[in-house]
Amino acid sequence: MDYRPLPEAHRDAVRRTLQYAFRPEAGPELDDDPPERPDSYSPRAVYADADAGTSDDALDADDIRAVCGWYDFSMLIRGATRRVGGLAAVASPPETRRQGHIGWMLDAFLGELRDEDVPFSALWPFEYAFYARFGWATTNTYQRTTVPPGELSSVVADAGDAADADNAADADNAADDADVDNADDAADASGRFRRIDVEAYETVDAVHREAATETLALRRTEGWWRHRVFDRWGTEPYVYGWENADGDLRGYLVYTVERDDAEDEKTMAVRELVGVDADAERHLLRFCRDHDSQVDRVRLDGPLGGDLLFRLSDPRAATVERRPGPMVRVVDVVDAVESTPVPEHETGAVVLSVVDDRCAWNDDTFELRADESGVTCERTDAAPSLRLGIGALSQILVGARSAPQLRDDGRLEPPDGVTDADAMEAGGSTEAAEAVATLDSLYPTENVFLHEFF
């Protein structure tokens, strides 16, 4: 078998495979005008009767056994921009499933990323247990908050009252309708909303870069803005921004309006609500509130919901769902460790036995060392202090889980031959306990949130 970039002549064959995998209800006919993908996307295919020496012209589309694609992303990893291979569109034809082709392709994909010096991979799984077998591990959860628009009034009032914060201690806890109107007047005087066209994506990108500072935040390209924000698989959302009195864009939101015919209700589905500060965020929520005559509920995707519960006058009016999010994987241990920053002035060394059943180059013992000159990672014959799988190491490096948390989960263990697991607890006298503490100081948990679905 051979894994390679997809020849142009076979794109329709792969589209049929993907349509059958993800939209079988659409039938076998293909759309004449498929949605464009960002230019960072590269499709791949596995051919049964081919090898590296087979020319593209000699390939037969009927020999395709599995397909995928990957996005060459730039994401923040502990404050530094790093390449991340975003795996997507993983599928195989129904007539050749359960024959190991997907697993073979995933191994080849990781090998390609290693050759390209891409230290991490991320994906949105169809099944978490399946991709965990191949070394990916969950990075973060995400929230979906649903609230009647009128309930946002208690949050909206904060925007107009911000200038009077010093006198707020003497104010009543609840505002009547006149107070809210005055708050809105003050908000209007301080800026305005405007609709944003795709050609102005650079102004929105500047807001996104200032606001999205969490680990795994995507540094979006023009193609991503055009084909995943302003046009999402053929659906064009509304995009509105909030400008301050100086005309500077301070926040934006991306949304559609969904209709439930059975209930005769409408939902304002907000996919992104991004403000550079709390004031901009409140104005954007005011924009949502002002749709109370049009929609029955506002649905907000993202981390905002948990905080919103503390700011609503009736938090029980909101429903917050918490769901598992994407997964991440270290491609190459040495490359990933040496490219991941550690906190300034933190030093230490630890020897880790890493278990990776899919990538032989990672299945080894490594010494990780941080000092004044930086971070190094080298293979070593020294006895390890800890043993962990590649998924656990991936979570530690990006800050999704801490070393003590993984120890408590049973995923960070003493090395083979050491049976006293209690010695790993804080205060223990063994090398294992000291190694857990070292990892915890070098790689504390981060605010990890990969927003983009791909």
Image (cartoon, rainbow, N blue to C red):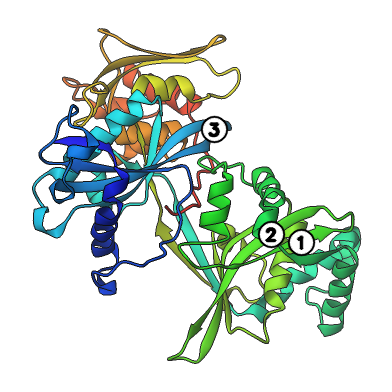
Where, by quadrant of the figure, is residue 266 drawn?
A: bottom right
Callout 1 amino acid: Trp
Question: Counting other residues with Cα less than 10 Å from the Cα at mark 2, is it few (<14), some (14-19), or many (20 or more)?
Answer: many
* Position of 341 relative to 2 (above/below): above
Q: Earlier in the sequence, mark 2 or mark 3?
A: 3
Looking at this rendering, what residue extends furthest in the front direction?
57
Residue type at numbered disc 3: Arg
Q: Neighbour class for label 1 at 10 Å: few (<14), some, many (≥20)?
A: many
Say if mark 1 contacts mark 3, CB within 8 Å.
Answer: no
Q: Which mark is residue 242?
A: 1
Q: Nearer the viewer, residue 318 or 229?
A: 229
The Cα–Cα distance between marks 1 and 2, rounded to whole angstroms, is 6 Å
Whole-angstrom CA distance, mark 2 to mark 3, is: 25 Å
Disc number for residue 453 = none
| Residue type of the residue flagged with mark 2 | Tyr
Looking at the rendered image, the disc whose residue lies closer to the viewer, 2 or 3, is: 2
Q: Position of residue 200 (x, y in %)?
A: 70, 54
Residue wearing tag 2? 252
Left or right of 61: which side holds 276? Answer: right
Residue 157, x across and y down, in percent: 79, 71
Kindly indicate the quadrant of the structure image that contains residue 16: bottom left
Residue 208 image offset from top left, x and y in percent: 65, 48
Kindly identify which numbered label has been placed on residue 78: 3
Query: What is the secondary structure assignment of the residue under circle 3?
Result: loop
Answer yes or no: do the residues labelled 2 and 3 have beta carbons within 8 Å?
A: no
Task: Work out whether residue 77 or residue 223 is closer to the camera in this orientation and state it.
Answer: 223
Comparing 248 with 130, the one in front is: 248
* 65 shown above or below 311: above
Say whether marks 1 and 2 touch (CB < 8 Å): yes
Residue shown at 73% from the left, 63% from the top: 282
Q: Residue at x 11, y 41 (%)?
A: 48
Where is residue 242 shown, x and y percent of the image? 76, 61
